[in-house]
């Protein structure tokens, strides 16, 4: 029996999160400043800190030629695991063994330089991923044809649309012909045709060429379709690994610890998510839903494209709210916050659990966050004494409809 392509044993990753407290009066401020100076002299940091374990004692193995999905909610440790496997981040404990060359597509356009052309970035990105110049030349026409960017090959990629950007980035990574291909949420962006094309290419890489693929996605239908086996991560630990259908069914049965409350986190290109909130919580079928999204820029930046996205429990996108500027872009000064507030007249979703995220395109990056909030749509109340149908019989959308019925007069024989 051949040795596993990927072996992970007792893998853990610890981060130290530093906090700086806020104070309302002069006495507390002076006291806190003195403590901070002492800590800086004594330990080299002036902030209070806490430990956060992104991964704890993770162990699994993947055989050569296997296609394995990795699922879990936001913050489960999926991206941290892939960064360690890609040698981007060092583990705090444990051991990994990779047998073969690895190509990773963890963030769309990683390794792309915005001022270089598509042609130049193919060679740059290919070199970063481990391809020789001869290999890149050999695969160049195939890479460009797959990405469908021939007309814009000598245009700086900063002028590319988000779809062109992701097509080219995926194409370079997929055509490297690595022994191990690691893909993180590439299907979160791009149109349906491109997503289908990506899945087809990954199937070809895995089954036709015998390569090993690790595939992370919130699209559970894509995971089930592509991956015979899946790994379920929750709170940095392995919950289960086995047949994808069984693992996904268990994942959907488990309650989420995410709530529809204001959240905050660092984003790409120096932006910070200060608030994302929906009201009321839970929503009521047929009633308005108010949303608030606040972003803050750490430096001068331009937001070219931004949308709120809604996903069902299978990870399929079911609706969007277009927040793009009519003038073409939102120009943000350093430290400036931009808030989007609005109302959705009514969410036409069948009862169930949904997730809310958004995409953000700046002049330098395009990122997608697909699982930030949990949105629960409760079952409708009985109508005119009729018991509502179960969710599985309702399709995907509730239609706002009216009807009347008329019985014609019967004819007498």
Image (cartoon, rainbow, N blue to C red):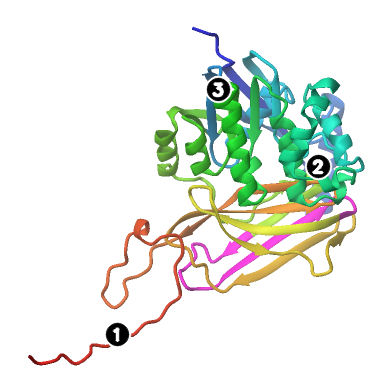
Q: CA distance from mark 1 to mark 2?
A: 73 Å
> Which residue occupies 79% across, 66% down?
325
Residue 94 percent location from the top left of the image:
62, 15
Q: Secondary structure at mark 1?
A: loop
Is 116 positioned to the left or the right of 15 in the image? right
Q: How would you rate the neighbour count of disc 2 (Cα within 10 Å): few for under 14, some for 14-19, many for 20 or more?
A: some
Q: Residues within 10 Å of mark 3 (few under 14, many from 20)?
A: many
Q: Does 293 lie within the magenta span? A: yes
Task: Please state which of residues 27 and 172 is positioned toward the viewer in this rendering.
Answer: 172
What range of the chain is rendered magenta?
Answer: 277-301
- Residue 78 or 48: which is nearer the viewer? 78
In the figure, is residue 270 to the left or right of 188? right
Residue 129 in view, yes or no: yes
Which of 45/272 is in front? 272
Q: Which residue is mark 3?
A: 58
Q: Label 2: which residue?
A: 32
The circle on residue 241 is none
Mark number displayed over residue 405: 1
Residue under the point 65% across and 28% down:
182
Separation (CA) of disc 3 from disc 1: 61 Å
């Amino acid at each position: 029996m051949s040795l596993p392509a990927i072996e992970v044993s007792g893998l853990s990753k610890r981060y130290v999160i530093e906090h700086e407290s806020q104070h309302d009066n002069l006495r507390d401020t002076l006291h806190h400043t003195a403590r901070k100076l002492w800590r800086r002299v004594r330990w080299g940091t002036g902030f209070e800190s806490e430990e956060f374990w992104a991964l704890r004692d993770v162990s699994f193995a993947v055989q050569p030629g296997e296609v394995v999905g990795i699922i879990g909610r936001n913050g489960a440790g999926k991206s941290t695991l892939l960064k360690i496997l890609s040698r981007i981040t060092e583990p705090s404990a444990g051991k990994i063994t990779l047998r073969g060359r690895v190509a990773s597509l963890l963030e769309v356009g990683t390794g792309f330089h915005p001022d270089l052309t598509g042609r130049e970035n193919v060679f740059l990105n290919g070199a970063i991923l481990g391809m020789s110049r001869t290999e890149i030349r050999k695969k160049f026409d195939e890479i460009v044809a797959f990405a469908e960017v021939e007309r814009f090959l000598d245009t700086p990629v900063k002028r590319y649309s988000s779809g062109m950007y992701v097509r080219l980035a995926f194409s370079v990574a997929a055509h490297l012909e690595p022994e191990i291909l690691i893909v993180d949420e590439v299907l979160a962006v791009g149109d349906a045709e491109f997503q289908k094309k990506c899945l087809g290419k990954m199937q070809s890489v895995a089954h036709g060429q015998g390569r090993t693929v690790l595939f992370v996605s919130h699209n559970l239908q894509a995971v089930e379709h592509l991956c015979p086996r899946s790994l379920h991560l929750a709170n940095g630990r392995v919950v289960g690994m086995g047949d994808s259908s069984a693992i996904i069914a268990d994942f959907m049965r488990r309650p989420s610890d995410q709530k529809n409350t204001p959240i905050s986190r660092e984003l790409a290109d120096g932006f910070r998510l200060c608030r994302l909130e929906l009201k009321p919580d839970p929503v009521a079928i047929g009633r308005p839903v108010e949303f608030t999204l606040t972003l803050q820029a750490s430096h001068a930046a331009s937001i070219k494209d931004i949308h709120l996205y809604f996903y069902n429990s299978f990870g399929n996108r079911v609706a969007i709210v277009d927040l793009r500027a009519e003038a073409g872009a939102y120009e943000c000064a350093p430290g400036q916050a931009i808030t989007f507030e609005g109302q959705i007249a009514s969410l036409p979703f069948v009862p169930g659990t949904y997730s809310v995220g958004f995409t953000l395109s700046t002049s330098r990056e395009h990122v997608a966050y697909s699982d930030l909030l949990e949105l629960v749509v409760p079952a409708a109340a009985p109508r005119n004494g009729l018991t509502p149908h179960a969710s599985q019989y309702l399709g995907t959308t509730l239609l706002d409809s009216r009807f009347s019925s008329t019985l014609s007069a019967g004819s007498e024989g």
